[in-house]
Image (cartoon, rainbow, N blue to C red):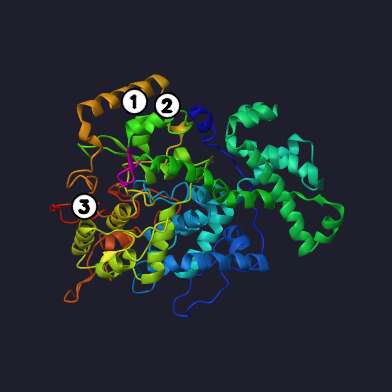
Amino acid sequence: MARIFFHFLVVLSQAANFAANGEGFLVGHRSPRQPSLLAGMGMQSAELQAALNDVIACSSGKERAHRETVKDAVLPIWRSMPKNSYDRVEWKSLRYIAHRYFMQRFAVMVRGLEPIRQVNMSHAGGAEILSEQVPMVAKQLLNVSNEQHGFAFDDAVAIIAALEHVVFDTERGELEALYRKRGWDTRQSVSSLDLQMLLREYIVYWMSADDVEGAQYLLSDERLLNEHIPHWKLISMLMRGSVKTMEFAKRRRPGAGDAAVAFSGRHSFEDAFSIVKEVGKSFASFWEPQCQDIKQSLAVMDTMHTGRVTLADFYGANKEGEWRFGESEAYLRELGALDESSPWRGVQVIISNYLQAASNCIISRQNYLICCVNECEGILGDIEAALGVPVAEPEAILQLVGNMTTDDDDPILLDGALHTQLMRVASAHGGKVPLHGRLFAQWLHYAFPRECAFPHKAGAASATTPSEFGDGYVISPDEVEQRVAESVIQQDLNPDASAPPPVADWMTQWSEDEDLPGDYSLQLRAPWDTDHLAVLGGAAAAAASVVGLLWATAGRSDEIGPYGPVASAPTTTTKLHSV
């Protein structure tokens, strides 16, 4: 059954046309002394203007409302990001903000923005889809002078809004192809029933990615759909319900041209496309109960509440009939879902990392993945909203997190080991904790082991889909039997294996490697230091902040982290205590 589930997690290469129209550019309030970086480009290209106007020109009430929505979502993160003396952020920070935005709002991982992606001076980790779909945007942004001092808030909103538009607009080509397949013209209207049948067919192709023959085979028989697509009946109901919801909305608040639709019951291509886009934006929420089922199945095996289960128990669940949990050990390692640091527990599967892994992203497209909701986004978001600063005193963080509860309303227990580790993080940064650094993300993982993923160092893991990994992504039944049998033998030889972990075995995966998503020179400068603390490489980091935005060219090949050069904290050892 694992093969059946993974079958729908392959990558599709789907080209699409980017529709651009409208007038104006980056209309909005800005400080007169700090004009927008994009506006300052002087509109060198009409094509660039057309590419962005459709999203950010605010030439219609709908687009203005959309931009305000993006602003509201981005603002809490923006307030807590490090900025330079011009109140701007560099590209590494903007890349981080964009990734967080898509994960928070849609549980969408945009290809190129993955935090675990290795980034260097010649590859700045831009969103691949912009270079493919609207290359003039990438070209113009690449050529921006470093004298612009980084990106203002309106720049960030404009770029993220444009990226959102492009990401969800890529499915237009798929829908147009289905219209042609049925012999329909995109200018003609279709009945409500025809639209429901069309969208039912569309969702199968969408989930099947580039396996066109497989999608056609499944669509040939309803029984095949029920057998091979998890929860097909619910998915089919979603598409029918989306049509009914649109019809109700148009009858309740008809817009221009909607009155005729309300009476005739017919729909345009744009109606169909609007449903497709909304399904894409909301599909993660629709699928989240399935993700929670995965989490609960693993949590039952996590008797020590470490957010980990042994690999043998993981495969044992598969042996007992659980159709998930069939990824091979090599594939789990590639995904960053394994903890192999404990000599006492052996190889373990990290629950939060597994949930966020590409193998559990139900939709896999060429330029984006739709994954399980990242529960840590809500936790970090609460911390950002409460503190509102890039760096914070460890005491303030401990007080804030200590008053939090889990989803089950259980209090968060911050033991001595967690206190000690947070103080060490602060010590590495002159007494304060950068809220968006790898070390704090690591601390959050141990405070919320089932919600916050362990942050691997850049390049140590990847968002590789099963089809990208190859035939070895799934474990064979014989291997499952062997793993379970070996576990039984080990338990017989070590009957104390189910006891609480010994001291210092709880955080064995902890590493002291820091990785900051921007230049913290102003925020981490010592009071007695007249020069900026070059946490991220000083001028070299600043020079690379814009170059490579969305489109990398030649340059240095020095390896840096996903958001910039990696800084190492002191490597002194600390005695850890079990939770």
Question: Tag 1 or tag 3, which sits nearer the N-term?
Answer: 1
Of residues 425 and 205, the one drawn nearer to the viewer in this rendering: 425
What residue is shown with label 3?
Answer: 512
As for residue 48 lying within the magenta part, the answer is no
| Residue 319: mark in rendering | 2
Query: Which is closer to the viewer, label 3 or label 2?
Result: 2
Q: Amino acid at mark 3?
A: Glu
Q: Residues within 10 Å of mark 2 (few under 14, many from 20)?
A: some
Residues at marks 3 and 2, CA–CA distance in whole angstroms = 38 Å
Considering only vertical position in the picture, is 485 above or below 386? above
- Identity of the residue furthest to the bottom in this view: 32
In percent of width and height, residue 267 lies at: 79, 50
Q: Secondary structure at mark 1?
A: helix
**Crowdedness of circle 1 by 10 Å Cα count: few (<14), some, many (20+)?**
some
- Give left or right: position of 572 versus 128: left
* Dots 3, 1 in contact, CB < 8 A: no
**First of labels 3, 2 by sequence position:** 2
Which amino acid type is marked by label 2?
Lys
Q: How many marks?
A: 3
Write down the residue under mark 1: 484
Q: Can residue 521 be seen at all in this image of the molecule?
A: yes
Whether tag 2 and tag 1 are in contact, CB under 8 A, the answer is yes
Q: CA distance from mark 3 to mark 1?
A: 34 Å
Amino acid beneath label 1? Val
Viewer-side residue, 43 vs 282: 282
Q: Residue furthest top?
A: 478
Secondary structure that dominates the magenta span: loop
Q: Residue at x 31, y 51 (%)?
A: 561
Q: Residue at x 64, y 27 (%)?
A: 224
**49 with respect to 180 (left or right):** left
* Magenta-colored span: 302-309
Disc 3: CA contacts within 10 A as few (<14), some (14-19) or many (>=20): some
